[in-house]
Structures are given as C-alpha cells and as structure tokens.
Amino acid sequence: MTYQMKELADRWILPLRGSRVTGIDWNDNVQILLNPEGKLTVGRGALLTHGPVSAPDANVRTLGQLGQEGTARRCAGSRILSAVGFKNGTLRVVFDSGWHLNVRAAGPLGGTVVTAGDSITWPR
C-alpha cells in the first residue's frame, strides 16, 4: 500500500486518518502503534490534552507526567481523525476520543518520526 502526504504551504497532512491505536511501547521514546501498519514515535515531552492545547481549560500534561498507564488509558483503541506535521517542526494528532497529541517545535527534538507502512512519512 502506498502512503502519501498532502503538502500545503505550511504543513503536511500525514496519511494516518482512520488508523487505530493498537498499542504503546514505552522506552527512551514513546511509540504509538497503529493499524493499518504505522507508528508515531515521540519523546516523553510530547503534550497530551483533552481538546486543543490552546483551550483555556486545557490540562496540559506531558506523556512523561502521565506515565505509560495514563497515556495508554487515554489513547488505546482511539482512531486518528487528523495528523498534521507543520513545516516549523510541530506535530499535531487528533484522536476520536477527544485527546490531542502535540509535539512543539521548540525544545529537544526527541526523535519524532511518523511511519506509515514500511516508509518514514515525516521525520522531524
């Protein structure tokens, strides 16, 4: 299967829409495993919020603060509604459960990589 990004002026629409979270591997980075075959690899400093990170009542927490169980509880089984890699290095993934995963452009890169199928789709 061929996975293609759609490029816009300031971002890429990543080919993950409809993918389901099937598992989470927790080591130096956090790997969110997807079906169809894919993976989001982010650092523990990635942000997870219910709703947009910019919402006034957002309870902004890093994956490291939530820990493995907290992250899995919020993401496991969710489907991806939107996955966007911005040209400034920011990544935003929206899940059908209402949770949003954000990797900021500032700060350590933390090995952020989006993989769809056998190919790297978006390395930050």
Image: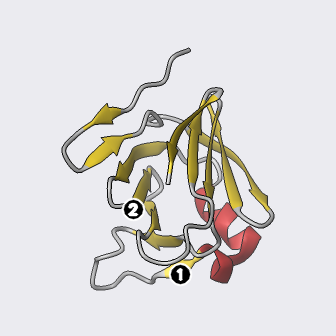
Drawn side of residue 34 relative to residue 17, left or right? right
Q: Which residue is mark 2?
A: 90
* Image quadrant assignment for residue 52: bottom left
* Image quadrant assignment for residue 62: bottom right
Drawn side of residue 13 relative to residue 59, left or right? left
* Outermost residue to the top: 1
Q: Label 1's element?
A: strand
Q: Mark 2 or mark 1, which is nearer to you?
A: 2
* Outermost residue to the left: 9
Q: Position of residue 108 (x, y in %)?
A: 55, 74
Q: Is residue 50 above or below residue 33?
A: below
Question: Local crowd at mark 2 within 10 Å, few (<14), some, or many (≥20)?
Answer: some
> Could you tell which of marks 2 and 1 lies nearer the N-terminus?
1
Q: Which residue is mark 1?
A: 61
Drawn side of residue 65 relative to residue 81, left or right? right
- The amino acid type found where label 1 is placed reads Arg
Residue pictured at 38% horizontal, 81% vertical: 58
What separation in Å lies between label 2 and label 1 (alpha carbons)? 17 Å
Q: Position of residue 60 (x, y in %)?
A: 46, 82
Residue pictured at 39% horizontal, 50% vertical: 85
Q: Label 2's element?
A: loop
* Quadrant of image for the N terminus: top right
Q: Is residue 121 above or below residue 2?
A: below
Question: Local crowd at mark 1 within 10 Å, few (<14), some, or many (≥20)?
Answer: some
Residue pictured at 18% horizontal, 44% vertical: 9
- The amino acid type found where label 2 is placed reads Thr
